[in-house]
Image (tube, helix red, strand yellow):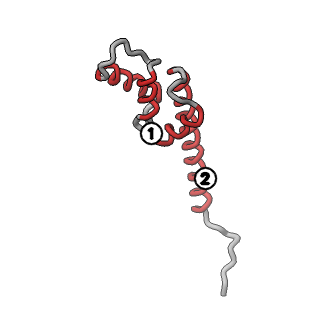
């Protein structure tokens, strides 16, 4: 999964590859082999977070929904981090007129 890729797009891309190359007849997205691959091929942070809430016995839609929730939370955290860094940079770049010089 690419860092900026939405989980639903990733799941669709993985499904296309998995269903084409698996050789399993009648494979569906609810198949435990596909759901295990979906979890296993996620990035390490997503995989660890999913392990706390979901396993390959969960419904496909539940797995993708949880991945989307984690993705959205990560975007929000990154946005907050960028705002904090910008605020700190602005604060530290201003001259501090209250500082007294030492003679």
Element assignment for label 1: loop
Indicate whether 38 appears above or below 16.
Answer: below
Indicate whether 6 appears above or below 25.
Answer: below
> Among all residues in the image, which is located at the extreme top?
26
Structural crowding at the residue carrying mark 2, measured as other residues with C-alpha within 10 Å and reported as few (<14), some (14–19) or many (≥20) = few
Q: Viewer-nearest of labels 2 and 1? A: 1
Residue at (42, 28) in percent of width and height: 10
Give the position of the C terminus as an image quadrant: bottom right
In screen coordinates, is 37 left or right of 84?
left
The residue to which callout 2 is attached is 87
Residue at (41, 29) in percent of width and height: 37
> Among all residues in the image, which is located at the extreme bottom?
103
Residue at (44, 19) in percent of width and height: 31
Give the position of the N terminus as an image quadrant: top left
Indicate whether 46 appears above or below 55.
Answer: below
Percent across and percent down for residue 87 are 61, 53
Percent across and percent down for residue 27 are 38, 15
In terms of depth relative to the viewer, which is nearer, 84 or 6?
Answer: 6
In screen coordinates, is 25 left or right of 56?
left
The residue to which callout 1 is attached is 43
Q: Earlier in the sequence, mark 2 or mark 1?
A: 1
In terms of depth relative to the viewer, which is nearer, 83 or 8?
Answer: 8
């Amino acid at each position: 999964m690419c860092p900026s890729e939405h989980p639903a797009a990733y799941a669709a891309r993985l499904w296309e590859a998995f269903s084409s190359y698996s050789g399993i007849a009648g494979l569906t997205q609810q198949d435990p082999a596909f759901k295990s691959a979906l979890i296993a091929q996620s990035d390490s942070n997503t995989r660890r977070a999913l392990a706390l809430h979901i396993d390959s016995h969960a419904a496909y839609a539940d797995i993708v929904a949880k991945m989307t929730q984690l993705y959205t939370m990560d975007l929000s955290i990154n946005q907050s981090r960028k705002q904090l860094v910008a605020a700190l940079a602005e604060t530290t770049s201003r001259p501090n007129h209250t500082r007294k010089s030492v003679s």
